[in-house]
Amino acid sequence: MNIRLGTFVTAVLIGGASFVAHAGVEQGQVVAKGCVSCHGAQGQGMGKTPALAGLKADFIVEQIKAFQSGKRNNMMMSTIARKLSEQDALDVAAYFASLSAK
């Protein structure tokens, strides 16, 4: 099995969604720097802001898309989500999914 196929299979088994194979946890950590002031340094949530650590990546992407489309509305999140590319959303979701829920 070549490395690329092995990475894909591993990502699917760990992440539970095929898109995770195209997501980068390391790049997601870079994108997530804009999230930490509300969601916490380790995605643990702060106050009324929900924790993201340990959530399934596909759920996080779904929520980002809902903020982008206006299906969900929160001034701060909608503004931030609309600035994310599809790849940014995949990456940041993979990053938060890789963290341990506290």
Image: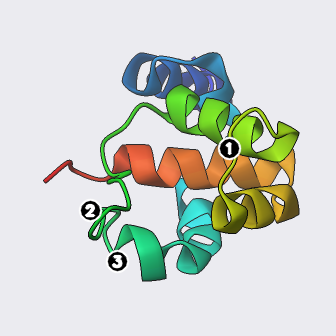
At 51% from the left and 19% from the top, the residue drawn is 12
Residue marked by disc 1: 64
Give the x, y percent position of residue 85: 86, 54
Secondary structure under tag 3 reads loop
Q: Position of residue 43 (x, y in %)?
A: 35, 63
What's the mark number on residue 44? 2
Q: Earlier in the sequence, mark 3 or mark 1?
A: 3
Q: Which residue is mark 3?
A: 41
Kindly report the distance in space between the C-alpha atoms of the residues bearing marks 3 and 2. 7 Å
Marks 1/2: CA–CA distance: 17 Å
* Residue visible at 30% across and 42% down in the picture: 54
Q: How is the image coloured?
A: rainbow
Q: Is residue 24 visible?
A: no
The type of residue carrying mark 3 is Ala
Mark before the other along the chain sequence, 1 or 2: 2
| Image quadrant where residue 64 sits | top right
The three-letter amino acid code for the residue at tag 2 is Gln
Pick the quarter of the image with the N terminus. top right
Residue 5 in sight from this viewpoint: yes
